[in-house]
Every structure is written in C-alpha cells, then in structure tokens.
Amino acid sequence: QSALTQPASVSGSPGQSITISCTGTSSDVGSYNLVSWYQQHPGKAPKLMIYGVSKRPSGVSSRFSGSKSGNTASLTISGLQAEDESDYYCCSYAGSNTYVFGIGTKVTVL
Amino acid sequence: QLQLQESGPGLAKPSETLSLTCTVSGGSISTSSYYWAWIRQPPGKGLEWIGSVYYSGTTYYNPSLKSRVTMPVDTSKNHFSLKLSSVTAADTAIYYCARSHRDLNWFDPWGQGTLVTVSS
C-alpha cells in the first residue's frame, strides 16, 4: 500500500475555483467508488467533507464537490473563501477492509 | 452527539509497547453499521490508517504495521484500544481514533487526537 499522490500545494484567489487531484492505482481509487476527502485546520482533527467520491455529508457547503476518473479522484472547491485555507487529504478503500490516505495538499487563499 | 476521546501516556520508550484507549460517548460502540479506527499523523506529515475493529472483536490492520498492532475492544466500557509494540522514533505521531462506516467507508467523527512521543 503506497500513499495516494496529491499536489503538495494549491492556491487561488477568493471567489475562484480550485481542484485537488488524488492519484492512486487500479487496486484502490480505480477499483472502488469509495474515496473520501478530509479538511484539517492546524492543530485540529480532520473533518469529513466528501464521501463515496461525490457525496456531501450534512452541513458541508455545496461549494465542495468530488469526482473521479480512472485512478484519479478530485476535490473541487468553488467560490474559494478564506476559511477554506487548510490541509486536505483524500482517502480510498483499498480492498480487504484496508484504507490508504493521500499525502495531503495545502490550500492557500491568496 | 457522538464523541470520541483518546487517552493514554504521551511518552513511550523505544522497544516498548504504546497503549492508547478511545472512549466513545453519546452512542454505543456495539452498532452493526460501524467499525472503529485508529489513524495516526507524524508531526508535519500526512495521515496513516493503522487499523479498524468491529464491536465483535474482528480486526483489520494496515499490512505495514500488522505484525506490531493489536486493537482490543471492550463493549462493556464502550471503548476500544490500540497496542503498538516495539516502538521506535518513527512511531512518534498524533494518534486519532475515529468511527468508520462499514459500507460507505468514511471516517467521522474523529477524536481530538493525542500526541505520543517515542523517546528514551
């Protein structure tokens, strides 16, 4: 199990849209529609933002959306706001009741 | 509202066993829809899934840690634990416990996390 690949950093201006990619393999991301995304502010526990590739839990802003194509999943944040500045991690089911996380992406709001 | 709270020593000596407990409040650990997980984060680094346990005691571990990990569950106390043996400095991390949905495979909510430092 290798960590999923994410860009180290992504930045955008307020109001813009940004997309974070999460690349795995045919054994994890490519095989299951079970990718989730987590937001982690400094010193805080991660917060679930997206599950099942594109589903939003209750209470999560509709500005957050997810998708997947082949072995790569993506998280898009629309209408970027200052409060979105955070670290984001993807996670995929990898079979046999195991999971693999991404290396994380730091989102900066310019 | 379901809450999870990690507890245990903040310091472990090299080659010894790290032991942590996650107490669940606001709900029962004995629910068929969920697993209970441990996830860790070395300082300044990313997240790593350690393993998951079902209320029945069934466990699933990260293959890279499997030889050193056990995760017992105590339904009478509504808590589950992590035991990581033969620790080294590389095991220094914030350790989180979290609820995991058995079918939808998400982690939510998470405990606040507890820092464990491995040092002599």
Image: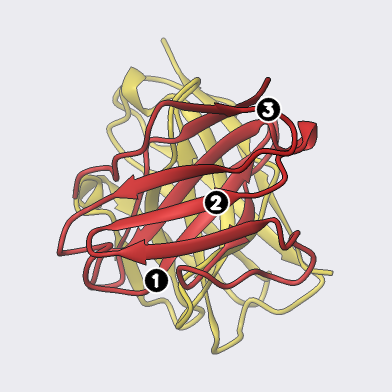
Residue B82 visible in rendering: no
Residue that appears at 72% across and 63% down = A62
Q: State the SS at label 1.
A: loop
CA separation in Å, label 2 and label 3? 14 Å
Picture coordinates of residue A6 (x, y %)?
36, 38
Q: Disc 1 residue type?
A: Leu
Q: Which numbered dot is residue A13?
A: 3
Whether residue B119 is visible here, answered yes or no, is yes
Marking on residue B23: none
Closest to the camera, between mark 2 and mark 1, is 2
Provide the residue designation for mark 2: A76
Mark linked to residue A34: 1
Image quarter (top left, top right, bottom left or bottom right) of the N terminus of chain B: bottom right
Is B14 placed above or below A1 here?
Answer: above
Q: Which chain is yellow?
A: B
Give the residue displayed 41% in from the left and 26% down from the top: A8
User: Label 3: chain?
Assistant: A
Task: Name the residue type under label 2.
Answer: Thr
Q: Which chain is red?
A: A
Residue at (55, 51) in percent of width and height: A76
Neighbour tally class for label 1: few under 14, some 14-19, many 20 plus, Cα within 10 Å:
many
Locate residue B29, reporting x and y percent: 63, 76
Which chain contains the residue that carries disc 2? A
What residue occupies the far left of the structure in this picture?
Answer: A26
Q: Kindly identify the residue that appears in the image at 42 percent across and 76 percent down.
A: B57
